[in-house]
Image (cartoon, rainbow, N blue to C red):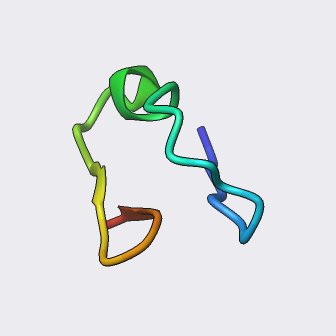
């Protein structure tokens, strides 16, 4: 599964629980993928 968090991210927290590897985290301004 490929994910992309772009500059339209509004920090709605919907992407975080969707990641099965827990690789999404809150960055300085928007969520990021590790």
19 relative position to 25: left or right: right
Q: Residue at x 51, y 25 (%)?
A: 14
Above or below, 27 relative to 4: below
Which x, y percent locates residue 10? 62, 49
Quick one: 31 or 29, which is closer to the camera?
29
Residue extending farthest to the right is: 8
Quick one: 8 or 24, which is closer to the camera?
8
Quick one: 16 or 12, which is closer to the camera?
12
34 relative position to 14: left or right: left
Quick one: 23 or 6, which is closer to the camera?
6
Q: Residue at x 31, y 78 (%)?
A: 28
Which x, y percent locates residue 17? 35, 21
Q: Which residue is drawn at 29% across and 57% down?
A: 26
Q: In which quarter of the image is the C terminus?
A: bottom left
Which x, y percent locates residue 20? 33, 26
Above or below, 33 relative to 22: below
Above or below, 1 relative to 25: above
């Amino acid at each position: 599964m490929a994910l992309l968090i772009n500059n339209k991210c509004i920090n709605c927290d919907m992407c975080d629980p969707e990641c099965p590897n827990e690789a999404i985290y809150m960055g300085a301004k928007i969520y990021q993928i590790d």
